[in-house]
Image: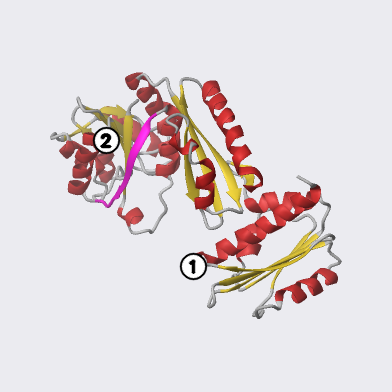
Amino acid sequence: MPSAEIITIGTEILLGEIVDTNTRYIARSLRGLGVDLYRTITIGDNAGRIAEAIRSSLAHAEIVITTGGLGPTVDDPTREAVARAFETRTEFREDLWAQILEVINRYGRQPSENQKRQAYVPSGALAIPNPVGTAPAFIMENDQGCVISLPGVPKEMEHLWHESVIPYLQARYDLRQIIKVRLIRTAGAPEAEIDEKISEFERLANPTVGLAAHSGIVDVRITAKAETEASADRMIAELEGQLRERLGTWVFGVDEDTLEGAALRAAASRTWNLVIVESGLGGALIHRLANLPAGNLVAAEAADLGEGQLPDHLEAFRAQHNARAALGVAAFPEHRIVELALITPETRLARLHAFGGHPDLLPRWAVNIALNLLRRTAEEDLGT
């Protein structure tokens, strides 16, 4: 199985001015092709440093993918950097220039002189015309592997990736194996406790099992390698069943499922019309619920509740809206305490939780434990 590294090029990305989405896109695609991704790197617009990174990546991986730095300006250094890494020069390609002119003319514009830079590629490169933009891509090969340089504009990169790069990789590396991933999403137990429950599975070679904690949520990741998608699916399904047996009610969903979605579905299954109150979270809970179908839900932010005041305030708000159920969460960052309250037709709960993590993570953690309390209580009332 070949390995890969991704080099993202752009000072604006390095300085945090724009968000790099290309790396995630390529990484997921490589995973699906059965290519191991060793490392991702972000480098500013400096040809020398980019060339050094390319040489380093080729020493570790057969496939090196760069994105960005193929524009027409002097601070678009990828062409020169790749040429340096391969100890050659760039050369002008008339066929690429003709293709660039065609794209420019399509928009009714006149080409500028500096756009000719985009028709230069390293000597000996396999050029990849770009029908959806003015930045052609290219591939350089040697005995160590290949460097694939793609434009940084996401839509252009994605088009060239699927139309040209994937077929190239499949042919050159005879890619017959795929990698599939399944996330089992859990809440209600810390990472260490989950690790104890499933540690034997974490020693497997294929499929593999790994954990990732996210402030009150722990994802259990299953990764399977197989020659066919059906085989990978079977491997994942068998292992997922075993893991679910161990994890039980901690599991609230898979893959893109959210805890807020699971909590509201559980409440809806009880036909509860629901009110929610938060305090001291800066709107974190309300924001999490904003993109979900409103249904029978009313949410409000209460300012400056003192410790112990949440249950009474929640009861009054529930009565005001004639709601069958009410969830409240109040955070007191100075004391690192979170207060929860939950009212249902069968239950009255009030709890204090101490938080030991970084203060900036307290709102997310508080929201997650509150939503999980609602989910589990609704499920228990149903006997699930």
- Picture residue at 33% right of the left edge, 59% below the top: 15
Task: Please check the rendered image and state whether residue 38 is part of the magenta-colored stretch, yes or no.
Answer: yes
Q: Residues within 10 Å of mark 2 (few under 14, many from 20)?
A: many
Q: Residues within 10 Å of mark 1 (few under 14, many from 20)?
A: few
Where residue 156 sits: x, y (%)?
42, 38
Of the 4 image quadrants, the one containing the N terminus is: top left
The numbered dot on residue 80 is none
> In screen coordinates, is 146 left or right of 357?
left
- Name the kind of residue labelled 2 in the image: Ala
Mark 2–mark 1 contact, CB under 8 Å?
no
Outermost residue on the right side: it is: 322
When the figure is inspected, residue 229 is found, relative to residue 251, above or below; the finding is above
Do we see residue 328 in this rendering? yes
Where residue 287 sits: x, y (%)?
62, 61
Where residue 282 sits: x, y (%)?
59, 70
- Picture residue at 83% right of the left edge, 59% below the top: 346
Characterize the magenta stretch by its predominant secondary structure: strand
User: What span is in magenta?
Assistant: 35-45
Q: Quadrant location of residue 234?
A: top right
Which callout, 2 or 1, points at the residue further toward the start of the chain?
A: 2
Q: Which residue is denoted by mark 1 in the rendering?
A: 360
Task: Report the front residue among 104 and 8.
Answer: 8
Task: Report the front residue among 132 and 235.
Answer: 235
Task: Report the front residue among 135 and 254.
Answer: 254
- Picture residue at 71% right of the left edge, 53% below the top: 376
- Picture residue at 34% right of the left edge, 35% below the top: 100
Do we see residue 287 in this rendering? no
Of the 4 image quadrants, the one containing the C terminus is: top right
Q: Which residue is denoted by mark 2 in the rendering?
A: 119
Q: Distance from label 2 to label 1 (Cα)?
A: 48 Å
When the figure is inspected, residue 175 is found, relative to residue 31, above or below; the finding is above
